[in-house]
Image (cartoon, grey):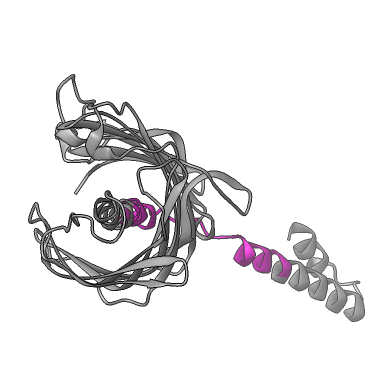
Amino acid sequence: MRKLVYYLKQGSMKPQKLIRLLFIFLLAALVMTACEKSEPEDIPPDSSSVQQLSKDDNSVEDNTDEVMIDAANVLAGTGLNKNLGLPCNVTLDSVFIVNDTIIYHLTYDGLNCIKTKFRKGVVIIKIKLNTQWHMPGAFLTVEFHNYEVTRVFDGKMMVINGMSRLENVNGGVIELLGNGVSMVIHKNTSHVFIAFNGHPPRDWHLTRHMVYTGTQGALVLAVNGFGFSQGYDNLLSWGTDREGKKFYTQISESVVFRQACLWVPYSGRQVYSIPANDIKATAIFGYNNNNEPISAGECPSRYRLDWNQHGHSGTLYLPLN
């Protein structure tokens, strides 16, 4: 600019040169302004999406598990004339055979046995003819048909449609743990569609390796993921979240549940990723209401969520329910 002022003071400068010089400086100013405008704005961090995902993922697992346990109880005996272990407020509408498969048609309509959820809808259980559920390698499939679950304490609801497969890897039944059975291993593979509180359904995959140990009243469940998708391994779940964005949930340390603590996550680590939001978070289970690690004999009520997004990070303590 000083040069421009200098030349303006020189009376001998030709008008053409003066115009050309003015044009050059004006062009430079425009380029600098455009560069300043094109610089990316700093996006403020927002961990709400991964907070919601961590809650939803636990709810989906819990609600599908409840039905899979119901199905295993129904099939705990052998043949068609077994004493069916029906859960509370569930009706067995029919049992019939199609080709080599026994099909159980169940209708849910009422509270579960511990009165924490109101359930309604249809569940269809299928198992191969002459297969005994307690034998190693036995497997069953469950179809969810508008299976609706409403939590009593807050009224939040989800509707599940789709299919789940459960394999009894090493044989035995959970009800006999501590009575001649020391360990029961299940593998669960599911592809379901979840509608949260009336919103459009989202697809949800589950791939879980579940090891039950302990004795009746003091059972312990350790869960790991064995799925693989889009370069992510050890996946517990993946699919589309409430916002319609792809997510991936991995287990980096076995997640442990205890019957004595009402089957809430007791310890372990899960890693949540939502690539579209450039956010990743690790849930660390086993904290109390004071946001401190639980002591021996204490049941957890909260979990810790360490998140990272756009180079920003933070820690939250969230309730398990």
Residue 29, quarter of the rendered image:
bottom right
Residue 144, quarter of the rendered image:
bottom left
- Nearest the viewer among 195 and 122 is 122
Q: Which residues are magenta?
A: 31-57
Residue 275 spot, x, y in % from top left: 54, 56
Residue 217 spot, x, y in % from top left: 14, 32
Q: Is residue 228 left or right of residue 55?
A: right
Visible in this render: residue 172? yes
Tell me what residue is drawn at x 15 percent, y 57 percent: 87
- Nearest the viewer among 5 and 106 is 106
Tell me what residue is drawn at x 46 percent, y 66 percent: 100
Q: Is residue 256 left or right of residue 151?
A: right
**Depicted 181 relative to depicted 76: above or below:** above
Residue 178 spot, x, y in % from top left: 23, 26
Tell me what residue is drawn at x 25 percent, y 31 percent: 177
Visible in this render: residue 43? no
Residue 35 spot, x, y in % from top left: 68, 64
**Depicted 75 relative to depicted 9: above or below:** above
Residue 182 inside the magenta-drawn segment = no
Tell me what residue is drawn at x 73 percent, y 61 percent: 1
Residue 35 inside the magenta-drawn segment = yes
- Extreme-top residue of the structure: 296
Of helix, strand and loop, which mostly describes the magenta segment?
A: helix
- Nearest the viewer among 148 and 41 is 148
User: So how many labels did they put on this image?
Assistant: 0
